[in-house]
Image: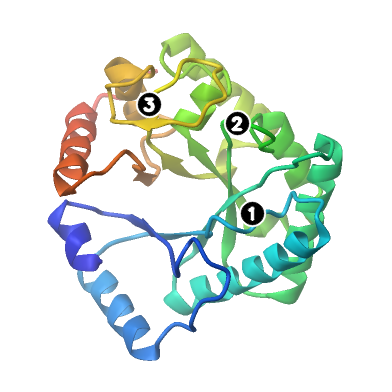
Amino acid sequence: MVARAKRVGCETIQIFSCNPRQWKNEPLAENEVKVFKRDIKREKINPVFIHIPYLPNIASGEKNLYSKSIRGLCEGLLRVETLGAPYLVLHMGRRTTSSEDEARERITQAINNVFDEVKNKVIILLENASGQGTEVGYTFSQIKAIIDGIDDKNRVGVCLDTAHAFQASYDLSRKKGLEKTLGELDRLIGLNKLCLLHLNDSKTSLGSRIDRHWHIGEGYIGMEGFRRIVNHRRLSHLPAIMETPCKNEADDLKNMSVVRGLVRSLLVN
């Protein structure tokens, strides 16, 4: 994994620590952890982000799934600590038949329970959603309400996914829309809580609430939209991960080249 990351020019990475499509996973092998930490340090890849598997849903009102999701999140925090990474990226989940208020309460209670159970220094990054179906956390006001209910706020931050934000009606394709988005994020949550960007263009239109990632500059956010995002004085210092479509390594190399080509020393106001 580290060799592939260096081959495509990564300075930071996001990985799964286990199979993201199953509940039960083998413990991390001690020798593999040792090699991982050694290679990350040698290649100067920093920071490392671990993404939670797809199955946990801490917004669920179904008791068995909710309980399994909390256990899965506890396990995730422990695996992140074992790998020596500082962050765990978390989707807030789907409320299904519950109200947004009920789902929010379950999310905050789950995170509080997990933090009580696993007392390490790993920071959970709440990733904004596109609002597809019954997803929770697609507006900054929803994310603020969740953070407000978390007891240990030092252990929670935010990951801003550009495609999800655009699909949830935050117009990152225009300068005015970007400034309005960052202003709202700062006012409600605080830009000091923003720790990671997911740089993804959107294959669907503004406010579609349909989650479809696309290649940088080829979607509705567009090349100029990303030029402003990656050079913005309030964002340019942040690590960024691309979750763009990948049929082969050439796709990753293409998107990496496009983003690097957009970066310039003169930051926009």
Horizontal side, residue 127 vs residue 238: left or right: right
How many C-alpha atoms fall within 10 Å of the one at disc 3: few (<14), some, or many (≥20)?
Answer: many
Q: Residue at x 71, y 67 (%)?
A: 68
- Secondary element type, mark 1: strand
| Residue 156: mark | 1
Dot 1 or dot 2, earlier in sequence? 2
- Residue 98 image point, x, y percent: 83, 40
Q: Select label 1 or label 2 by which is in front.
A: 2
Identify which residue, 100 or 181, lies in the foreground: 100
Residue 99 image-quadrant placement:
top right
Would residue 231 be seen by someone viewing this image from the given angle? Answer: yes
Separation (CA) of disc 3 from disc 1:
23 Å
Examine the rendered structure and indicate whether residue 105 appears above or below residue 244.
below
Q: Residue at x 57, y 42 (%)?
A: 192
Q: How many marks?
A: 3
- Residue 113 image point, x, y percent: 78, 66
Amino acid type assigned to the residue bearing label 3 in the image: Ile
Separation (CA) of disc 2 from disc 3:
24 Å
Quarter holding the N terminus? bottom left
CB-based contact (under 8 Å), mark 3 and mark 1: no
CB-based contact (under 8 Å), mark 1 and mark 2: no
Dot 2 or dot 3, earlier in sequence? 2
Q: Residue at x 63, y 68 (%)?
A: 72
How many C-alpha atoms fall within 10 Å of the one at disc 2: few (<14), some, or many (≥20)?
Answer: some
| Residue 229: mark | 3
How many C-alpha atoms fall within 10 Å of the one at disc 1: few (<14), some, or many (≥20)?
Answer: many
Examine the rendered structure and indicate whether residue 204 appears above or below residue 135.
above
Amino acid type assigned to the residue bearing label 2 in the image: Gln
Separation (CA) of disc 1 from disc 2:
24 Å
Residue that carries the numbered disc 2 in the rendered image: 132
- Secondary element type, mark 2: loop
Q: Select label 2 or label 3 by which is in front.
A: 2
